[in-house]
Image (tube, rainbow, N blue to C red):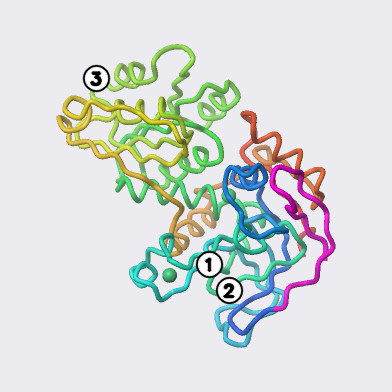
């Protein structure tokens, strides 16, 4: 089968011809229809995130049809439409037993620790394949299992409730999903903080109150718009110490700041006036949980979470096109996601 693989850190991905994976009794083989190109893939290629075993087929955002079902897999049949949960976990360690598989001691990320979905076929444990309702296109099914799932986890970690106001720092793939999911939770006012004019315009057209961080301090702007009160929840999706600090400072009493973006920078906080006084909470968010995916899939099935065609770019299963899409991720792209169309709808 055709696959696009990483053979050397810091070098472009390459087209390869590899055997179709053989499945075990607990696995399913999926004929890939669509695969999302994610910022993490650019980090694997560049070496910012470490990969131990090369060559490797990247790609952890996958939608497709079941081609073969292992003898012990009972919830799926050949031909079923599926999307995948990218974290393969053991199911028996202390964290898996508590439903916290992102901390699994033997966890493996698809497309990082094992071959991923930049290929015609992918093998995954049956437990990682979730039924994809007909209402959800394969491309949306692929990409929602990464950025949307993490956005949902961030809202859950922040204990976001109906009627609450929220500030979303960054309107890329995560922010675009977070906005729609906040709506699905019947949120109050939504503030989107951005510097990219196209993203500001897109957030405004969807009904967000946009805060242009180029024009004035976003914290001042949010405080002014809320008559000094601040917001209930802030999501930091950019990954910079400056916006993390802003996410904490724009909170009102009992506000929760969920930090999702990754950065190695430090930030300073004045404990008394900026956290203790208002009983604010600063919450770390990492990945998402299998138990959250049913809600996500249902929001997408009912149209509360959507990826209209104009928000996506489509490329082929071809190393040159995928490398170019990964290069573009280093700049601030205007569209939400680039998707690899592997097979036309089968
Ligand atoms: Zn991803
Ligand atoms: Zn485990």
Whether residue 136 appears in this view of the structure is no
- Residue that appears at 51% across and 59% down: 297
Q: From the viewer's perspective, is residue 119 above or below residue 303?
A: below
The numbered dot on residue 228 is: 3
Q: Tell me residue 16's x, y (percent).
A: 83, 58
Q: Is residue 269 visible?
A: yes
> Distance between the Cα atoms at labels 1 and 2?
7 Å
What x and y, as percent, mark residue 166?
Answer: 35, 35
Asked if the stretch drawn in magenta spans residue 17, the answer is yes
Instruction: Report how far apart the C-alphas of labels 3 and 2 lie in the structure.
Output: 51 Å
The answer to whether residue 18 is above or below residue 280 is below
Answer with the quadrant where ligand 2 appears in the image. Answer: bottom left
Badge 3 crowding class, 10 Å Cα cut-off, few under 14, some 14 to 19, many 20 or more, is few
| Of labels 3 and 2, the one closer to you | 2
Q: Residue at x 57, y 23 (%)?
A: 196
**Is residue 301 or residue 74 the one in the foreground?**
74
The circle drawn on residue 125 is 2
Q: Which residue is mark 1?
A: 88
Element carrying mark 3:
loop
Please say if the residues under marks 1 and 2 sit with CB atoms less than 8 Å apart.
Answer: yes
Q: Which residues are magenta?
A: 1-22
Looking at the rendered image, the quarter that the C terminus falls into is bottom right
Q: Position of residue 175 (x, y in %)?
A: 49, 38
């Amino acid at each position: 089968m055709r696959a696009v693989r990483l053979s050397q850190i810091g070098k472009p991905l390459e087209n390869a011809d590899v055997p179709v994976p053989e499945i075990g009794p607990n696995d399913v083989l999926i004929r890939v229809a669509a695969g999302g190109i994610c910022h993490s893939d650019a980090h694997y290629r560049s070496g910012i995130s470490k990969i131990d075993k090369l060559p490797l087929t990247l790609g952890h955002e996958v939608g497709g049809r079941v081609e073969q079902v292992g003898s012990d897999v009972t919830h799926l049949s050949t031909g079923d439409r599926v999307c995948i949960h990218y974290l393969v976990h053991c199911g028996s360690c202390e964290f898996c037993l508590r439903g916290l598989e992102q901390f699994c001691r033997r966890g493996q990320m698809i497309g990082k620790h094992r071959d991923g979905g930049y290929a015609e076929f992918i093998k995954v444990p049956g437990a990682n394949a979730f039924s994809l309702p007909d209402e959800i296109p394969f491309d949306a099914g692929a990409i929602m299992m990464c950025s949307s799932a993490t956005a949902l986890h961030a809202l859950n970690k922040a204990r976001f409730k109906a009627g609450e106001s929220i500030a979303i720092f960054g309107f890329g793939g995560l922010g675009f999903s977070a906005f729609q999911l906040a709506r699905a939770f019947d949120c109050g006012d939504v503030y989107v903080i951005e510097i990219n004019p196209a993203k500001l315009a897109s957030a405004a057209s969807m009904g967000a109150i946009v805060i242009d961080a180029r024009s004035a301090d976003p914290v001042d702007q949010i405080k002014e718009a809320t008559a000094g009160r601040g917001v209930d929840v802030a999501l930091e999706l950019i990954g910079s110490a400056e916006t993390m600090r802003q996410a904490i400072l724009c909170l009102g009493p009992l506000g929760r700041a969920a930090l999702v973006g990754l950065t190695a920078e430090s930030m300073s906080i004045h404990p008394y006036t900026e956290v203790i006084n208002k009983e604010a909470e600063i919450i770390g968010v990492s990945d998402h949980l299998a138990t959250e995916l049913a809600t996500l899939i249902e929001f997408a099935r009912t149209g509360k979470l959507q990826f209209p065609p104009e928000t996506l770019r489509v490329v082929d299963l071809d190393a040159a096109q995928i490398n170019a899409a990964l290069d573009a991720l280093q700049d601030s792209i205007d569209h939400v996601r680039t998707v690899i169309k592997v097979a036309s709808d089968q």
